[in-house]
Amino acid sequence: MENFIGYWNGVLLENAMQRTGFMYGYYLEDKNYDEGTRAIMEGIYEPSQEMVGEIAEPLTDDQEMARVNRIAEALDLECIGWVFTSLPLEDDLLLSPEEVLRIARLQNEHSTDAHFTKYVLSKFVSCAVRPDPANNGAPDLHPFMVSEQACAMLRDGILSSSSSERRCCLVREAGKDEMIPDFVVEGRSDKKIATDFFIVRVNDTAPKKHQRMFTHADFPRENRPTHPQRRDDLKKYFSKIPKSEASWSRFADFHLLLYIAKEIDVDTAVTIAECVRDRKDIPEGVTMIINELTQ
């Protein structure tokens, strides 16, 4: 997370460019809350993306996503959320209408009926990173979800936004032979609903003791236009790691595994990922392949 925020704050922000990424990790029971869930983030995949207006949007035909999910599955990880950057919002607004709709869409796309009740729910978390004017513009991280009502309204095609309305989501008018229920806001029916009514706050913490999946986070990130990955990065990466370190630990870098999957093959990366997951030595044949590339 520090690397993601640092790249945006130190390289992109001065050019008014934003960044987004998908967070991979796993879920644990959180005994601090009744039936609580804790999302543990282990790595961030930065997809190919482009600026659409004032926001960064992942490309819709990202060919790497299936490969990333394959590696994550081998590590017993899954996509638990996304992180995005933006400029500060006006009037202490927590989420803009466009952000509420994007979060609702992603929560719908990452919903499941695995709960014992078979009730469809989502545990997909969104993290907004913005400069904090109260702290000299230093980046500040805010995790959110949106309510199930927002997700249902978007799913049913009745919730939208407008560039002229900066604080509220809009309920569309009913079409012919169609009925849309009234939405009561502060005691009266209203077609404009402030984004605050849809926001679910999520607590973020750093554990005192964290059993990290990855022992390294030094390999260059993927899809950064100002810092493209190169084959020579493999040699530089391994030259900094002691050869006395356990073989699985030397490869325990999320972005290294994604690079191996892309530049060598997915099966090799999956084999390494499973060794990282199980804390087992990397097969000799695999290390020979990597050694040949780093000579």
Image: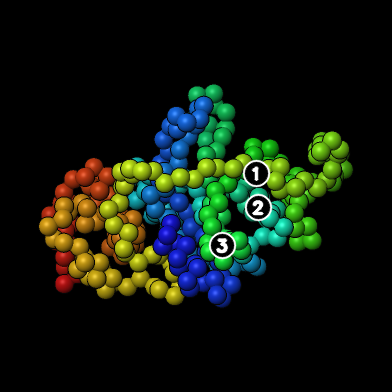
Residue drawn where x is 68% and y is 37% of the image? 149
> Is residue 280 visible from the viewing direction of this image?
yes
Residue drawn where x is 27% and y is 44% of the image? 277
Residue drawn where x is 41% and y is 35% of the image? 28
Residue 225: image location, x then y, percent = 45, 73
Residue 77: image location, x then y, percent = 38, 44
Question: On the rendered structure, is 133 left or right of 216?
Answer: right
Name the quadrant containing residue 54.
bottom right
Q: Nearer the viewer, mark 2 or mark 3?
A: 3
Q: Quick one: 110 or 178, which is closer to the camera?
A: 110
Q: Determine the CA span between mark 2 and mark 3.
A: 19 Å
Q: Determine the CA span between mark 3 and mark 1.
A: 24 Å
Do the CB atoms of the residues marked 3 and 1 lie less than 8 Å apart?
no
Find numbered disc 1 in the image and state the secondary structure of the residue it sits on.
strand
Q: Name the quarter where the N terminus is drawn.
A: bottom left
Residue ID for mark 3 = 135
Question: On the rendered structure, is 9 left or right of 151?
Answer: left
Residue ID for mark 2 = 95
Residue ID for mark 1 = 199
Q: Determine the CA span between mark 2 and mark 1.
A: 8 Å
